[in-house]
Amino acid sequence: MKPVATIDVLPSGGKKIFKNDTFVKIISIPIVAIVVVNSTKIITNEKYGLLVLLTNYIFFIALAWLIWEGNVRLMIYLKKNFPVSFAAYYKSILTLYSIVITYTAFVAFSGLGLWLAFSSEDTDSLNRLFSAVAVIVVLAMFVASVYEIFYLSEEQADTVKRAKQLDIAKTHAELVALKNQIDPHFIFNSLNTLSYLISTDPSNARLYNDTLAKVYHYILFNREKNLVLVREEIEFLSNFFYLLKIRFGNAIDMLIEIDSLQAEELCVPPISLQILLENAIKHNELSEHNPLTIHISVSPNFIVVRNRIIKKTYQQPTAGSGLKNLDNRYKLLTAKNIIVYKTADDFIVKLPVLNAKK
């Protein structure tokens, strides 16, 4: 099953981390290498000819590059694979410094120790080796701190940018939701159905009216929220489906397989399931002899909405704005994407869910 539409989004730690540090490394690494080995006197320049001396300094620069670049790669790996909350940030810094110290000390001690073993330095240079390693570790921690400061600045700028994008997307989503629900045709059909029920079935007419009020109340009440509990979304969806059921009768059906515990623990953007329900009804033929059934269930990290494909005799062209808008909201809210794909018989949409306790 090949996805029809997916949008790849890296975790927040994976975006263009330390992308523009090439020039800094080209300038800084040779300078740091030369200054450290001379300030700690681990090398006695007078003991070497020009060619051997140049070879030694190339080795020191390569070792400095290995330490610098290795620490950068480790930081990128930690940011990508172990994102932390604000509350756990200080623990992550301690972990970062521990890794930097361990890696730097090991590489510096191994590299310089190996060089000393084959160099012309005196055998009493072990103290200078420890001094050089200590200086290198301190410098590595300083460089890691600078990188972390730039990373946090970039994160803050990205957060501000995403917040602005989210405000725009929320406004658009509100307009789309209200347009879809407070559409003249929808109101006309709802009022016609209500009028018919009043004259033929007054008890159901009152229930229909109350349900219609609940649908609009949910939309208006939750339009400012980013996320709602799955339980709330399912209650809204059930009310909305009741209105559709009155209109389409046995031509549609809905099966929800989500237990109460999952419904209380998971969150989704408001009106997201309703968009998928409308999408299924819009793109499939409805008839009582071949009813359309929408299945809603939970798989690990996703709510899965599935319906059998019943092709319409005449399919009107559509812009697909509902799914695109929903996908955009998910990107901004969760840095994840919805997954849409088809099998030979079914149309399936997978919505990422968030745990309400986190």
Image (cartoon, grey):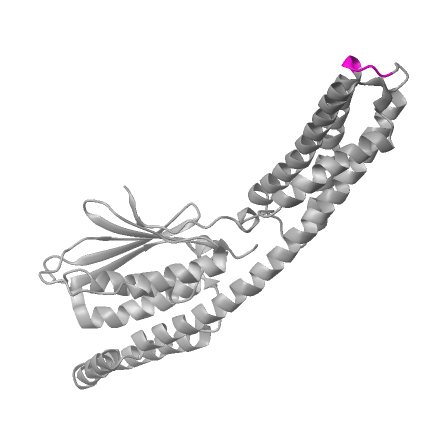
Q: Residue at x 74, y 22 (%)?
A: 56
Residue 172 in the image: state x and y as whole percent: 40, 72
Identify the magenta region. 117-121
Above or below: residue 100 compared with residue 14: above
Which residue is more in the foreground, 352 or 318? 318
Q: Residue at x 73, y 20 (%)?
A: 51
Question: Looking at the magenta stretch, what is its main secondary structure?
Answer: loop
Q: Is residue 309 left or right of residue 160?
A: left
Which residue is more in the foreground, 30 or 323? 30
Q: Residue at x 9, y 58 (%)?
A: 289
Identify the image quadrant of residue 250: bottom left
Q: Quadrant of the C terminus?
A: bottom right
User: Is 351 a magenta residue?
Assistant: no
Above or below: residue 207 compared with residue 294: below
Q: Is residue 188 left or right of residue 89?
A: left
Q: Quadrant of the N terminus?
A: top left
